[in-house]
Structure formats: structure tokens, C-alpha cells
Amino acid sequence: MGSGTTLVETVKLGANAIGRDINPVVHFLVKCALSVYDRKAILETYRAIERDVADEIRSYYRATLADGTQADVLYFFWVKVVDCPACAAPVDLFGSRILARHAYPKKVPQAHAVCPRCGGINKVHVEDRDARCSSCKKTFDPNAGPAKGQSATCPSCNHSFPIAKTIRATGKPPAHRMYAKLVLLQDGRKAYHPITDEDQNLYAKAEHSLAKHKNAYPVVAIEPGYNTNQVLGYNYCYWHEMFNARQLLCLAILADRIRIIPDPLLRDLFTCLFSGALEFNNMFASYKGEGTGAVRHMFAHHILKPERVPIEANLWGHPRARIVLHHVRGSHPPGARLRR
């Protein structure tokens, strides 16, 4: 029955449908999609989850701006970092310094780029080859970066090296550096800002809390296979290594709360929604840009592609940002049959 498309269309036509599949995950997802739910019970369950854990999760996605005001962080931006084999200097695997551009650049050519010297975030034209940083006043090429194709060039010593081979030689998954964030201002506008010490301290707090959280996530090895050999080549040996510490912590908080939902039908439904949240909240997700759905989920390429510039979304979500669980409010999961 696959993902259940034929079954759903059959039921919509008023007929009875029977589906079979050898994949237990498929069975679970289709069962959740075609079960009959009480809309009121779904929303009450969501509100109970929100009441119990939303503030704690949101606390890890807040920032203090330069004027002292508080803002919600919609997205944190990360870049993979590899030590140069020749001089050991850390090399950011940017293919371009542009971190955000519009989905239709000919219509909206303004983009945002990170300065390679000071980390300042600058508004640039999407085709600019020469920009002046508004923070350090140095010039840089927004459309150039150390990484090009399968190789990278160290900005410190100009040594070129193969990216995948260099990562494999370390014997561990690649490191990441947080370099920017997209915040929601109090007047409703969105703004890109560089990472501050406060952001680093907040992430360190998440790491500390994760270390104290019992059984935060399952430790499951990644088996070799056609769809996993690429990530194994990047030294991802366990599934939890595809998430950063803040994601693992907030997902653990959410999973613990879903686990105690007393109604098994609703517990399965929210587990299904949680599975969708996993798809969008990992270090294999990337930024689609402005003017479209912001997050490109980890299976968008139909392979497990190690993302060089991953995006970390606010896990609880916000009306101004894309997130799976937040869609429960005022709506229902695709295919779900709701009883008034």
C-alpha cells in the first residue's frame, strides 16, 4: 500500500479499503492517517502538551538584541568545519558566503551574506562579486567560499584538499559552527543577525541539560546500505549523530511528554507528528531561502546527504516559521478523519 495514497482516495470515495505492507513504519503512518479522531480531543491534547513543555523548549530559541529587547529565534544557521590537513586551521565549508536569498532572485535580488573576516551579516545583491562589510569595512566576494565541488581550499595556507576523504581520516563526524540566526522582531519583521556569546552560552546550556537527561535518545547504529553508505563515509555511525545537542534535548523533552498521553489512539497520532518533526529538525536539513517554505527536510534529495550549511529550526515552531507540530493548531494531519 506504500504511503497509503490509493487507500485514502478509496475512502474519500466512500468505499472500503484494505491495505497491506511489509514495512511496519508504513503501516503505522497509514493507520494514523486513516483513523477516526475527535477534533476536540486532538486540540485539548495539543494544548496540554503546549502547557507542559512549550515554554521550556522555547527558552532555547531566544536572543537578546543590541537594543536590549528579547526576540524569538526562528532559525540558527550552521556550517560544517574541517581542519586543513596542511596547517590545521579550521575551514568553513561555505560554497558561497550568501546564507539567504529569495526563491525568485530576478524578482527580489537582495540577499544576505556573512563576512568571512568578522562574521557580520550584510545585505548584498545576489550577483555581487565585491561587497563591503558594514561591520569591519573589509571587502569580500559574497559568491565565493572555501568549498567548491568535492574539494575545499584553506583560506590560511591556500592548500586544496578533498572534503570527504579529509573528514573520513578524522574518524568522527564533522564538526559544525553556528554563525548566524534569523530572529523575529517585536514589530513582526524578520532580521538576520550574527551569533553572539549569549547564543553560544545558550547552546552550551542545552548541551549540559542533555548530558543530565536520562535516556534522551536511542543509540542505534547505522547499518551499511545503498542509502546509508554516504553518511557512513562521513563517519556518521549512529542515527543520533545527525542531530545537534539542542535538537536532541528538545526532541527528548517533547517525546517524554507524548509518551504519557493516556489515549493510545492520540498517542500514536502525536507520535506520527513527532516523526514529521524529526524530518525537519536535524543537521541534514537546509535553508530553502525566502519567498518559499524555509526548511528543506533531510529527505528532499531522496538520499541522506550530509549538508554543508545546515539550518536548525525553532523546534516548537512559530506562526512565522515552518514547523510540523505547530500545524496541529487549527488544523489536522493530512488524511486524518476527524469526528466532530
Image: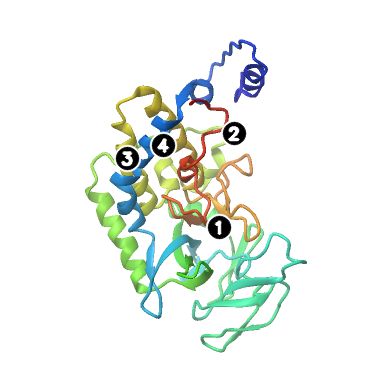
Dot 4 or dot 1: first in sequence order is 4
Labelled pair 2, 3 in contact (Cβ < 8 Å): no
Labelled pair 4, 2 in contact (Cβ < 8 Å): no
Dot 3 or dot 1: first in sequence order is 3
Left-right relation of 233 to 8: left
Q: Name the residue that disc number 1 marks.
A: 308
Q: Name the residue that disc number 2 marks.
A: 226
What amino acid is found at the position of numbered circle 3 in the picture? Ala
Spatial distance from mark 4 to mark 1, Cα to Cα? 38 Å
For numbered disc 1, what is the local secondary structure?
loop
Spatial distance from mark 4 to mark 3, Cα to Cα? 9 Å
Labelled pair 3, 1 in contact (Cβ < 8 Å): no
For residue 208, above or below residue 331: below
Spatial distance from mark 4 to mark 2, Cα to Cα? 40 Å
What amino acid is found at the position of numbered circle 4 in the picture? Leu
For numbered disc 2, what is the local secondary structure?
loop
Spatial distance from mark 3 to mark 1, Cα to Cα? 37 Å
Residue 296 at x, y percent in the picture: 59, 50
Mark 4: give few (<14), some (14-19) or many (20+) Cα within 10 Å: some
Q: Which mark is residue 43?
A: 4
Mark 1: give few (<14), some (14-19) or many (20+) Cα within 10 Å: many
Residue 191 at x, y percent in the picture: 52, 70
For numbered disc 4, what is the local secondary structure?
helix
Identified at 31% across, 56% down, the residue is: 206
Quarter of the image where one finds residue 70: bottom left
Instruction: Give the label, 2 or 1, closer to the camera.
Output: 1
Spatial distance from mark 2 to mark 1, Cα to Cα? 21 Å
Is any part of residue 115 visible from this angle? no
